[in-house]
Amino acid sequence: MAVQVASSSSAGFTSKTKYRYDVFLSFRGEDTRKCFTVNLYDVLRKKGINAFIDDKKLGKGEKIATSLLKAIEKSRISIIVFSKNYANSTWCLDELAHIIQCKKEKNQVVMPLFYKVDPMDVQYQKNSFEEAMVALEERFRNEVEKDRNSFEEHRAAYEDRVRKNMEKLQKWRSALFEAASLSSAWFFQDGCEFRFIERIVEHVYAMLPPKPYHNIEHMVGLEPRIEKVISLLNKSDKGVCMLGIHGTGGIGKTTLAKAIYNSIFYQFEGACFLFDVNEASKKFQGIVHLQQKLLSEILEEKIMSFGSADQGISIIKHRLSHKRVLLVLDDVDEIEQLERLAGGCDWFGCGSKVIITTRNKQLLIAHNVKRTYELMELNDHDSLELFCWHAFHMTLPPKGYQQMSSHVISYAKGIPLALKLIGANLANKNLKEWRSTLEQYDQIPERTMHEVLKISYDCLQEGAKIIFLDIACFFEEELLGSIDEIAEACDYGARFYIEVLIDKSLLSINDNDHLCMHDMIKQMGREIVRKEAPSNPGKRSRLWNYKDVCKVLHENSGSSNIEGIIFDPPQQEEVEWSGKAFKKMNNLRILIIRKAQFSAGPKYLPNNLRWLEWQGYPSTELPPNFSPNKLVVFKLCCSPFRLEEPFKRFEYLTCMNFSHCEFITEVPDMSQFQSLRKLLFRDCYNLVKVHDSVGSLSKLVELDVGGCVRLTTFPHEINMPSLEGIDFSHCKSLDYFPHIVGKMDALTDVWVEDTSIKELPPSIGNLSGLESLNLSSCKSLKELPNSLFLMQNLNWLGLEGIQPDSRKSLKKLLLESQPVSYTNVEFLILKNCCLLDEDIHLTLNLFQNLIELNVSGNDFVSLPNCLKECGRLLDLDVSNCKRLRDILELPSNLRKIRAENCISLTTESLGHLWSQAKREFYGMSITLPATTFLDWFHNWREGGKMSFLARRIFPHLVFAFELGKANTSRRQSFHYSLSINGRVVQKKHDDITIRPGHVSLFNLGVAFEGEDWRWVQRFMELDWNDVEMQVIGLTPEIAVVKCGVYVCNQQINMENIRFKSPIMLSMNAPTTSLKRRAIASPPNEPPKKVLRKFEVADKGKINNKKKVSRCAFAW
């Protein structure tokens, strides 16, 4: 028997987390390595899921490897295969404990899988698991006793070892209990192993995040070209189709390829768009890097590095030959690039599509690409429209500009990029300026596209030219989000000139609000720099190629011509140098170094520097004569830099980032840094003191010392009117918050969670712009400031777990705020604060603008009538309020109520709650103890499946299900599915989490809203449609005992819905459920006889659907 206990949530996945693996497999080798686990691993890999499996055999007594712990931490999901002898291995138990730790700290998704073992044996350590734990305890005792004689003189060491062994055993027992209690579990006893594995893999695949969607900008005449290329791709559905898009540079090949990718990528098992293949392949191991990126994006995993392109070819063919993929190779220029990235159709699975864009048609012929599409220039009509769009922001030229506009498009020759640049260059100019500019185009002797594009550069002012070349050479898209920093580092009125470049279409802003530059424009800018000294990089103004940088630094061949350097190799690079290479570069303004290990620290740095960014800076101090009086950006992250000398020379500095510098112990006097806007010391674990001068930085916007666990000394007063965010979170040694001097209206976010702060000063009231304040887990906090509730902009307030002294202070503040003086707090957390009735009454009187309120784990008995005055409240959590009896009236807009483990609720309160839900239910969900029967529902069924007939439109329904009682009180997860006429039209993997003995009730308009709801309506195609709604959980010990529906707006919907006879049971239900199942009588009807118990005589009857379908169910 193979059963899923419940589905797990993908909520643990965050965009900021960096994963190396999709799945980590924890298993006992001697039980399942050669059978179940290896089959599971193979199916995961075939699905393109990057699973980690440890193939090493562990010797007895060995400790778990650090690399294995890191593999767990870098995995999205951990699957634990519990088998009979799992607990016999300390290796497995250490893995398990670390997995549970990652679940708590990193929100990792954990899926327990019980392979031929009882989950209760794991949870409560019975049978083989009990024997294993007893054996381990005995083993530890024997080991200690064996060495007892050697401990006689060191009694403390002996007791310490005993204590540590007992702690380890307890840690393992707790991990077994917690893992077995998880709702995201799967259970296999017997049956078809392969089908069970397929279900697991499908479930895992559904939880993984989707591929990113590459947006493109509007382009004239694009739609018919997309349709033509897709029709060519669709002519070879069965095999692998390679299609080449060829045409001149700037004609829109990449734009067309992106549009096609966006249209079809979701149809494939994996997809990848490799941009700028030609440029990327010319970098160090560029082809290898592209191969790794190809595999990484298609398989959605970080690929282990390999040393050669030949090795990459073998891996691609092995990993992708059975996978249906979409691959776009953009801007391919050499046959070798194709041969190593998409060498043949046999590299990819049937149905795969490979799209190649290139300027070289002969390359496609040489590679035997049979289907090609030549992207032609725009015709005059489309050219004029595109030009006018950028020149006039209209589709036709205004009066007086018609003839010149027609003349202009002859320069561009139908090339979209040129039309865009020329149009932007002429925008907002009068007729005289137009004629002058057109004369420049007329004077180009050979109108190559490079020269046509270069006219836009030539028309720029000198300052704009400098900024343009800086951006073309140094700043990739991800850096260009820091526009202010770039502008100040480049100087020359950079902010103004960046706007000019955007207006001229030499720069653009993408959907992520980052600046970006077209590849041809970037190439044009770099070619301008290269021509400054074609054969001598040391004489050029800017260096961006890491080989050129290495050569110049190693040979000390730089010059005063060099204004900027970026050294950012594709992988860690070792640099041998004397440390004197910068001596000749006295005009160097920009120095950016990443992923490099230098043989020595610099003996000299130019004083002209404005941007100094050196990741892993190889010294504890700066050169003695370094005095950059114009330095703007200063970043030395992850370095041994100590920050010991006084920095009196950096008066223009705006950004300092020394995060993860473990040798910094003190922030020195910074009174000369009055231009500073960002100051970051995140996770500087040994930082103890921050100088008082930091508190007077008037222009500082962001201050982050979060994670500085040894920080004890911080300025006692701060006067920083520009500050927007300050983060003290997890500064466990800091026991005070600074006094606020003057008004600091700009400060919106203050995070002091998990600190030792004892009080907030009264001057906190000066933070009139404060929006978020997190005081959670501040166990030493004794008193809250009187001004706390006077902050009119405070929107989010976290006070979870405040201690008795703080609770008294909170009550005092609430009393002093009466009569009612409403606050604007919308999100309030008062979890586990021991609040009583008077406290909750005062709280609700004061906080009447709440949207979300969490008062779980408190001691009040009644929710007062004033709750209904919180008209904006959408989410209320009163779980674990075990003394709560009365819930009177609710706000009409309330959407979600969680009242789990509220064991004292009266029947009257529950009835009143259901009445409220019935009247104002649309959009609401409720979770409560299952103490009363919802007799106002129109139909009930035993189990978690409800069937009915519906016609016309899908009716608006309320669905409820009850979870049976169990030995655990932990929340269980479920997901729901909807089938119409036998087709699953929606599977929602968003978890419904409830505790055993509770009922969850929600409106289907919430479960399937927006596009989902419209999609459901499309399947209502018959006169009467067979509808099945199911809540799915996989553990028979914690079963859904019944479910029901209530029809909203009965006058409209009841005539379009028919409930089936209650004796109709689906044969998809597990036999364990059928044995227990009984049919409930419909409301208001006399009870009927219970179904005869379904006896299973042999497995053949279970597996034979025809036989089962004919079994009699007698009344």
Image (cartoon, helix red, strand yellow):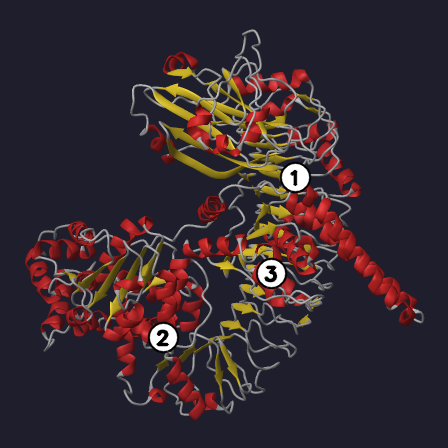
Density class for disc 2 (Cα within 10 Å; few <14, some 14-19, many ≥20) is: some
Whether residue 476 is visible: no
- State left or right for residue 252 relative to residue 563: left
| Above/below status of 174 relative to 366 | above
State which mark lies toward you, 3 or 2. 2
Whether residue 435 is visible: yes
**Residue 884 found in image quarter:** top right
Quadrant where the N terminus is found in the figure: top right
- State left or right for residue 137 relative to residue 295: right
* Earlier-in-chain disc, 3 versus 2: 2
Residue occupying the point 45% across, 18% down: 1048
Instruction: In the rendered structure, find residue 704 and report the number of the disc placed on it.
Output: 3
SS of the residue at dot 3? strand
Residue occupying the point 38% across, 56% down: 513
Q: Whole-percent x and y of residue 516?
A: 33, 63
* Earlier-in-chain disc, 1 versus 3: 3
Three-letter amino acid code at disc 1? Phe
Instruction: In the rendered structure, find residue 309 and report the number of the disc placed on it.
Output: 2
State which mark lies toward you, 1 or 2. 2
- State left or right for residue 880 relative to residue 610: right
Residue that label 1 marks: 789
Q: CA distance from mark 1 to mark 2?
A: 64 Å
Three-letter amino acid code at disc 3? Asp
Q: Are marks 1 and 3 in contact (CB under 8 Å)?
A: no
Three-letter amino acid code at disc 2? Ala
SS of the residue at dot 1? helix
Q: Nearer the viewer, residue 201 or 1111?
A: 1111
State which mark lies toward you, 1 or 3. 3
Density class for disc 3 (Cα within 10 Å; few <14, some 14-19, many ≥20) is: many
